């Protein structure tokens, strides 16, 4: 069966040191790693906009509301199905896209345009894989961060180093990132926790660790896809 994998990214602020297309660049970088592990599987273009309303108090952010985002993904998948792809996998590379993709998976029953549709939606599994890589190097989850911290900065250094301005890399919010913190972000916006748009500390980032983050995620996601391929 013809299988294709694509990322669903975003266009939004990533602190003073990373480009606004960070999640889209990293989605492409991640899916490249996935398809390298799955011979015969195609890579689709990354969707560059996502659900980013919680970042709108920072300049450069472009957001879609949830119904619009789900419809964009649905029509994207329907187009791929019309071109003969029978197995379509969407991988979110932006935190705000996980829950809407889970909703779309449920609403479609896993079928779009006659193709099997699979959306990865386990945000905690995604984060746990990254935390494990960081902790092996002595990088705590608070430093690795959930947005524009050490982990994302390291991956952009690995993927597109010319777009990172490390002279502007600083510490952001390094407190507890628990359910209360997540709720504050989605209810009040990122400024509820950070004035510079960073969750974590970007300063310890390295390209070498960024590649290991990408490879660990690609290993996990390639295995997840393999389990769902006929």
Image (cartoon, rainbow, N blue to C red):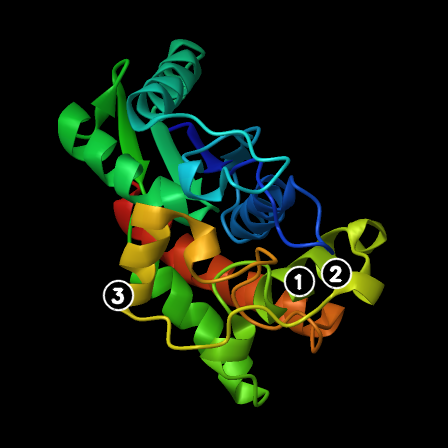
CA distance for labels 3 and 1: 25 Å
Q: Which mark is residue 153?
A: 1
| Residue 3 seen in this snapshot | yes
Sequence-first disc among 3 and 2: 2
Identify the residue position indicated by label 3 in the image.
180
Quadrant housing the N terminus: top left
Disc 1 + disc 2, Cβ < 8 Å: yes
Q: Position of residue 183 (x, y in %)?
A: 27, 56
Disc 3 + disc 1, Cβ < 8 Å: no
Q: Position of residue 88 (x, y in %)?
A: 37, 30
Sequence-first disc among 3 and 1: 1
Number of other residues with Cα within 10 Å of mark 2, as a class: few under 14, some 14 to 19, many 20 or more: many
- Near-viewer residue (81 or 52): 52
Above or below residue 163? Residue 214 is below
- Near-viewer residue (137 or 148): 148
Query: Mark 3 or mark 1: which is in front?
Result: 3
The residue drawn where x is 50% and y is 85% is 135
Given the current orientation, which residue lies at the most extreme top position? 82
Residue 181 image-quadrant placement: bottom left
Identify the residue position indicated by label 2 in the image.
157
The residue drawn where x is 49% and y is 43% is 55
CA distance for labels 1 and 2: 6 Å
Element type where label 2 sits in the image: helix
Above or below residue 3? Residue 217 is below
197 sits left or right of 220 in the view: right
């Amino acid at each position: 069966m013809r299988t294709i994998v694509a990322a669903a990214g975003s266009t939004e602020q990533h602190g003073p040191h990373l480009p606004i297309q960070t999640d889209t660049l990293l989605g492409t970088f991640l899916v490249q790693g996935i398809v390298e592990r799955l011979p015969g599987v195609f890579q689709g273009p990354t969707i560059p906009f996502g659900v980013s309303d919680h970042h709108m108090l920072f300049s450069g952010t472009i957001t879609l509301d949830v119904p619009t985002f789900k419809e964009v993904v649905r029509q994207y998948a329907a187009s791929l199905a019309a071109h003969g792809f029978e197995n379509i996998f969407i991988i979110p590379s932006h935190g705000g896209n996980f829950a809407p993709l889970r909703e779309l998976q449920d609403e479609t029953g896993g079928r779009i345009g006659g193709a099997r549709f699979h959306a990865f939606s386990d945000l905690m599994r995604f984060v746990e894989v990254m935390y494990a890589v960081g902790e092996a190097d002595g990088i705590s989850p608070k430093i690795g961060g959930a947005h524009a911290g050490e982990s994302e900065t390291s991956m952009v250094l690995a993927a597109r180093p010319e777009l990172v301005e490390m002279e502007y890399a600083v510490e952001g919010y390094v407190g507890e990132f628990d359910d209360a913190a997540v709720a504050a972000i989605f209810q009040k916006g990122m400024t509820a926790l950070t004035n510079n748009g960073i969750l974590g500390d970007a300063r310890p980032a390295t390209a070498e660790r960024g590649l290991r983050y990408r490879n660990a995620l690609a290993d996990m996601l390639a295995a997840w896809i393999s389990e769902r391929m006929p």
